[in-house]
Each structure stands twice: as C-alpha cells, then as structure tokens.
Image: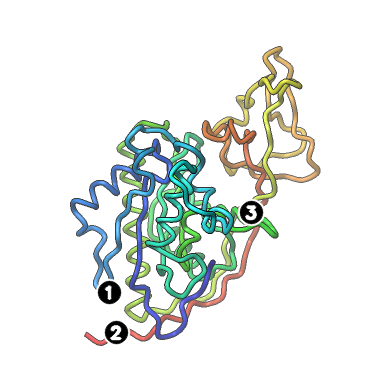
Amino acid sequence: MSSTPSRGHQLDRVAVTGGTHGNELSGVYLVKHWLQNPSELQRGTFAATPFLANPKATKRCIRYLSQDLNRSFTRTFLTSKETQDGPYEVRQAQEINQLFGPKGSADAFDFIFDLHNTVSNMVACLILDSEENVFTMHMCHYIQKHTQGPCPIYLYGLPGQENYSLQSVAKNGLGLELGPQPHGVLRADVLSHMRALVACGLDFIDLFNQGTSFPAFDIVAYKIIEPMDFPQSPSGELLGFVHPQLQDKDFFPLKPGDPIFQLFSGEEIFYEGDATIYPAFINEAAYYEKGVAFYKMKKCTFSIPPLEAPEASAP
C-alpha cells in the first residue's frame, strides 16, 4: 500500500527496521544501538520505533531460517494458518504485520524504513515499489539533495505483482540498500552512511509534520524490467561468471553488444537486447539462489506532483 498523507494528517507512527536479513549488519547493529539509545530517532513531532525484524536469523548471522522474510508479506503468507512447525519467517511476518499493520488498513503505521546491505556496488540505493507513492518520492528527492554521494532510486514493482516486502506493511515505506559490504561484515563507512540517510529521512518527515509543503519536480529513477540469470548447464551448474567489465557497474549503461558474462572456457557472452539498460544488484551473493545475476533496469524520468503538508500542530 502507498498513500499520500491527506491534509491535516501528520506522520506520527514511524518505524525503523533492521535485520530483515540477519547477515546484513549495518541495519542490525544500528537498530540494536537505537533500542538501547533511541534519542537519535526522536524529532520534534514524533519518535520513530526501532525494531529487529528477524532476531533468530540475526543471532545466527544468516539471511533467513526458512524463507526470505522480505518476500513473506503477501496476502497468502499473512493470512495463512499459523502453525508451530510452519516456516519461521511466515510467523514472523504475521507478527510484524500485527505490530505495524495490518497491511492495507487505516491502522497501519505511517512509515517504515527498512535497512539492508548488499555485496553489489549499489552505493546508497533508495528502494520503493512505485513512483506513484508521492510522499516517498518526495522523501527520496529530499535525501538526494541533502546527503553526499549518489542515491539512485530503485523501483521494484512489476505490473500485477503484489507488494511482498516488509515496508509494504505500512502506509508508506522506503528501503535503504547500501553496498558494497560483504554479508556478515560491518564497514564503518557504510554504517555511517546508512545512519545519515535515516537521519535525513526522519528530518523530512519532521519538516512535513511541521507544515512544510514541497513543490513539484522531475526526477530520474530506475524501474525493474526483469532478472538476468547466469549461464548454466542443463543440470543447473554455473558455466561462468559476471564479466569483469560489468562487475561493480551497477546503474551504469549497458549497451547491446557489451559483455555480461565470461565462461570458464574463456568465451565471452554479450548482451543481446535491443536497447540500453542499467543493471542493478550485479553479482549479489544472496541472489544466486534466486537465479539472478543482475536485474535489468530502465532509466526513467518522472514528474512528481507537489506535496501539500498538513497543518502544523499547535505548540
């Protein structure tokens, strides 16, 4: 669900979740810190709630126990009958939905930040379902203007596809995907950058709540087309790897005829599309099991309408 807050409605209930994937440690340790020291998440008009999303996976420093928690927020999973021997992440998704949702309801939290790391060179990527979420697109624009370094916007929704992510439980949400950082590892620069992005997003909500309106703008974002798998044998064995010329080139243009894979034999495989694309999540370790070497993305420019703020609260 995505919605633009109506005039008169402030965003009072905000959550910051980390550890949705238990081996992505920037979010894990920031949330652990904020649970003990929540003052960083407090603003004049609200205080955000920190939450460790997948504590069992976090304790074992693995991505998940039974299934990917960040793919477990569909209606099918959220309404399935809970059993003790069922998938742990389904039970956890249902608990999160009760805490911060229910998904699609008027009672759901106003906003969720969900913190992630990737081994891909995604820098500080801002992830949401659709450009139609006007509030979150305004937040992305604000973050891009008020933080250092590139912050590409990644739109993961496909036509007809139900939003499956944790952030979809709230009325609005934003995923922060920072890398490169190996899973199970902390990097000071990546953690500090994530911390600054969260602070900037909270500042934006606070400004909105105080009565600030934001004008219309045009913005570039990358919209998912489809995944690209590795070359494989009929039995499913890898026949090669991401080409050195493509490695670490997330969001760089990939033209027809450019190399994308190199086989163990030395043979090169070239991109055969008919238009330039912009790959993302190149060689992400967690996506090998999903059959994804990278995602094909198209570069788009969107015109985002103005955001009318609520009336400022009385002091």
Mark 2 in CB contact with mark 1 (< 8 angstroms): yes
- Name the residue at 42% across, 79% down: 213
Q: Circle 1: is it few (<14), some (14-19), or many (20+) Cα within 10 Å?
A: some
C-alpha gap between disc 2 and disc 3: 37 Å
Horizontal side of 246 relative to 232 (left or right) equals left
Of the residues under marks 2 and 3, which one precedes in the sequence? 3
Tag 3's secondary structure? strand
* Front residue (pair 253, 269): 269
Tag 2's secondary structure? loop
- Label 1 sits on what residue type? Thr
Q: On the image, numbered disc 1 is attached to which residue?
A: 45
Horizontal side of 55 relative to 158 (left or right) equals left
- Name the residue at 44% across, 85% down: 7
Q: Nearer the viewer, mark 1 or mark 3?
A: 1
Image location of residue 305, percent across then percent down: 56, 75
Q: Circle 2: is it few (<14), some (14-19), or many (20+) Cα within 10 Å?
A: few
Tag 1's secondary structure? loop
Q: Is residue 114 above or below residue 6?
A: above
Q: On the image, numbered disc 3 is attached to which residue?
A: 223
Specify how the rendered protein is coloured. rainbow
Horizontal side of 193 relative to 171 (left or right) equals left
Q: On the image, numbered disc 2 is attached to which residue?
A: 313
